[in-house]
Amino acid sequence: MECNIEANKAQCNCTYEPCSRKGKCCECIAYHLKMDELPACVFPPEIERTYDRSFERFAEWVKGRG
């Protein structure tokens, strides 16, 4: 399977501008999991902008939706 970086970038909501992993989803996910966090794409914009990408923050957000 070939990575379509430009198409991925078009859908990427990450606001961290110097990120070298934008559009490279496999690298992004691996990096964030290694850091015990989730990538920007699983968060809504208002949470993503805080850069709190922790599993705890994700769980709080999910619990608040229900």
Image (tube, grey):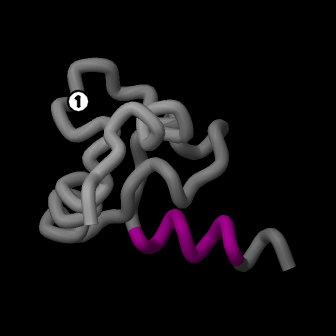
Residue at 55 percent across and 40 percent down: it is: 11
Location of residue 18 in the rendering, given as x and y in whole percent from the top left corner = 22, 20
The residue stretch that appears in magenta:
55-62
Is 57 in the magenta? yes
Residue at 51 percent across and 64 percent down: it is: 57
Is 25 situated above or below 48? below
Location of residue 33 in the rendering, given as x and y in whole percent from the top left corner = 23, 69
Q: Assign a secondary structure to mark 1.
A: loop
> 12 or 15: nearer the eye?
12
Residue at 13 percent across and 68 percent down: it is: 34
Quarter holding the C terminus is: bottom right
| In the image, farthest residue toward the top | 17
Quarter holding the N terminus is: bottom left
Callout 1 amino acid: Cys
29 lies left or right of 53: left
Identify residue for label 1: 19
> 27 or 14: nearer the eye?
27
Residue at 63 percent across and 38 percent down: it is: 45
* Chief SS of the magenta region: helix
Location of residue 26 in the rendering, given as x and y in whole percent from the top left corner = 24, 61
41 lies left or right of 5: right
> 60 or 7: nearer the eye?
7
35 lies left or right of 58: left
